[in-house]
Amino acid sequence: MKKVALSALAAAMISGVASADALTLYSDPKTGQVYTTPAEGRVEMGDFIDAKSVDMAQRESESAFSEYKDGMKKYVNVKSHAKTLEFSGQHFFGLTSNSYGAKNAQGADQSTGFELRRNYLQVKGYFNDKDYFRVTMDSTKELESAQQTVSDGPANTIIKYAYLYLDKVLPYTGVEIGIAHRPWIDYEEHNSWYYRSINKVILEDKFTSTNGVDALNSADLGVNFQTKTPYFSSELGLFNGEGYHSTTNQKNNSGLSAEWRLTAHVMGNGEHVGKYKLDKDTYANISFAGISTKKRGMSATALVNDPTLYDRNGYWFHAVYNQPEFLIAAQFNHIQDKTLDSSLNNSNNKTIKGWSINGEFRPMQDWTVLARFDSAKTEYVNNTTSNTNNVGDATQMIYGIAYDYNKNVKFIASGKTVNSKDTTPVAATAFEGATTVGSQGDKQSWMLTTEVNW
């Protein structure tokens, strides 16, 4: 290694000397004499440098190499069986202030605090230019979260992704095997709703503890086939169905989740799906996606008629159009849950119908005005009381301004207004004076967010 580096440095030094101090020589073929000037009958021999200059260049290159070795002592050697290691990270930090219509479940009508909404650390080990293994660690500490509550203590760290990716196992198709992407969430977050740092997409969102869609999440144990062509892309996957952060397992369970996404790319740039540059690219995508999950909620101790078990089937349509000045996207979703407890007389069977529309306006370079409106309505079977009281029904409005500080850092100021339609009476002791779930579910949030990507 030293000899190679030394030779390279010496060659560079000598070439520099040659370019500055080279001497062109000429010879007379008849007499054999050598001259430093051209003349009639003399032949050019080439450019030459004297031995003293060569020796000086070699000594200078040895000195430069010695300085290079001293500088490298502060670095740590990394060894891997992979051809290339790629490290990256994504981090969402924020300050959030919430105001509730009445006391929440913790007995307070307000909450304010700093959040670590997401802290992704990722490494990809490439075996060649296309195939790799990916691991992504996820840490979260939020004011309100299904994974982490204030009383849980330090931020939890879990594995979000851990999968093998093999490119072109079929024509135009690669495959993820392991804790892999589910077909929908990542697509929407990288094609139409780019603000995961302030809110999930509607299909993953629970507006409050009792309202919202919350139909699936972004990753799960399974296999996902991904196809990309200019005018069509798709993802077809088979998973456990509980999600990457579920506490349940597959013991005594043969039920799996089949999930899919089919997308038409009107502009013919489907090969770049998920990697668009919003301020430069124009694209229009139309998608149909769905899910069919069996025995959702199965745990190791589940009984045959466990009331927590149900089958979930659903589908949704989505369209997005972007050009450098603005983005507009909309979707409609239809989710059905069927309980496996025959003793409940189908009273827990329900259908969730939701729709969402979001947009961006970019009035000047690096600045974006954003807005989104979500609506979710739950219809129960053989449960007149829940339907009458609009249990699970809610709307939410999200709005804000984003500033791209540079290619790695973004700042966002945003607000969110949740309006719960639920009017079921609640005992005063449960919520310290709250009179309805509706007033408890209403919420106003203000957020300051720093998003970092590297």
Image: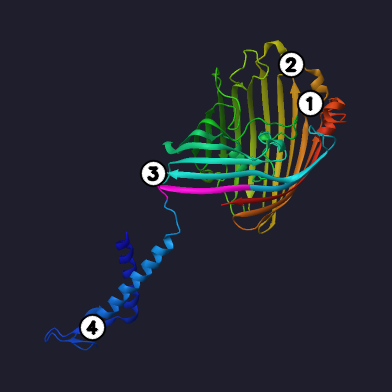
Whether pointer 2 and pointer 3 mark residues with C-beta atoms closer than 8 Å, the reply is no
Disc 2 from disc 1: Cα separation? 13 Å
Q: Position of residue 446 (x, y in %)?
A: 77, 46
Q: Which secondary structure lies at badge 4?
A: strand
- First along the sequence among labels 1 and 4: 4
Task: Assign the N terminus to one quadrant of the image.
Answer: bottom left
Give, as a three-letter code, the residue at label 3.
His
Q: Is residue 289 above or below residue 37?
A: above
Q: Which residue is mark 1?
A: 391
Give, as a three-letter code, the residue at label 1.
Val
Quarter location, residue 341 = top right
Q: Position of residue 64 (x, y in %)?
A: 38, 69
The answer to whether residue 269 is seen in the rendering is no
Q: Of residues 298 and 143, which is closer to you in this image? A: 143
Whether pointer 1 and pointer 3 mark residues with C-beta atoms closer than 8 Å, the reply is no
Residue farthest to the left, as pictured: 30
Question: In the rendering, which numbered label is found on residue 415?
Answer: none
Q: Which residue is mark 4?
A: 25
Give, as a three-letter code, the residue at label 4.
Leu
Disc 1 from disc 3: Cα separation? 55 Å
Give, as a three-letter code, the residue at label 2.
Ser
Question: In the rendering, which numbered label is found on residue 347?
Answer: 2
- The magenta region covers 78-91
